[in-house]
Image (cartoon, rainbow, N blue to C red):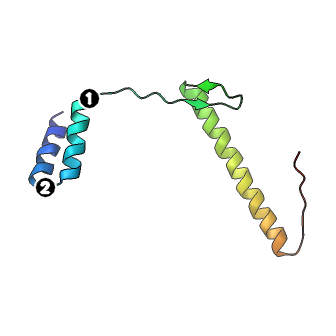
């Protein structure tokens, strides 16, 4: 708490107005609990840490796989091989 007050004083002295006002607002609000909510694959809301972590892990895994596939397709295209992939 003392560190935050000292930082407000420093920002005031050096005329760092933006950080001063942000610090005052944060100081006045105090602690506020933040709830993270994401939708899972089924569209249900997930709020617990492990479900959210699994959702993001799955998302980045799929994203990584798409990037790898894009590189493969680009390489095949560069060497003149056309690959048609049907979706459905």
Q: Quadrant of the N terminus?
A: top left
**Residue sitting nearer the eye, 71 or 86:** 86
* Circle count: 2
Q: Position of residue 51 (x, y in %)?
A: 61, 28
In the image, 42 versus 80, the foreground residue is: 42
Q: Earlier in the sequence, mark 1 or mark 2?
A: 2
Which residue occupies the foreground of this view, 16 or 53?
Answer: 16
At x 18% / y 52%, what residue is drawn? 17
- In the figure, 12 relative to 4: above or below? below
Q: Residue at x 67, y 39 (%)?
A: 58
Pointer 1 and pointer 2: residues touching (CB < 8 Å)?
no
Which quadrant is home to the C terminus?
top right
Q: Residues within 10 Å of mark 1 (few under 14, many from 20)?
A: few
**Relative side of 76 to 71, left or right:** right
Q: Is residue 22 left or right of residue 39?
A: left
How far from the left and from the top, in percent, is residue 45? 61, 25
Spot occupied by residue 60 in the image (x, y as percentages of width and height): 64, 45
Label 1's element? loop
Q: How far apart are labels 1 and 2 at the CA level?
A: 24 Å
Secondary structure state at the residue bearing disc 2: loop
In front here: 47 or 6? 47
Q: Residue at x 23, y 49 (%)?
A: 19
Q: Residue furthest bottom?
A: 79
Would residue 80 appear left or right of 60 to someone viewing this image? right
Q: Quarter-wise, where is residue 34 in the image?
A: top left
Badge 2: residue crowd in 10 Å (few <14, some 14–19, many ≥20): few
Instruction: Residue at 9%, 52% (x, y): give it.
Output: 13
Residue designated by label 2: 15
Q: Read off the residue under disc 1.
A: 30
Horizontally, is 35 left or right of 43 in the view?
Answer: left
């Amino acid at each position: 708490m003392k560190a935050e007050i000292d930082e407000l004083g420093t920002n005031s002295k050096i005329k760092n107005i933006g950080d001063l006002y942000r610090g005052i607002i944060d100081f006045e609000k105090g602690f506020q609990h933040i709830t993270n909510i994401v939708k899972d694959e089924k569209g249900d809301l997930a709020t617990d840490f492990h479900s959210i972590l699994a959702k993001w892990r799955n998302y980045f895994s799929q994203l990584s796989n798409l990037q790898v596939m894009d590189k493969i397709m680009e390489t095949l295209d560069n060497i003149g091989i056309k690959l048609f992939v049907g979706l459905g």
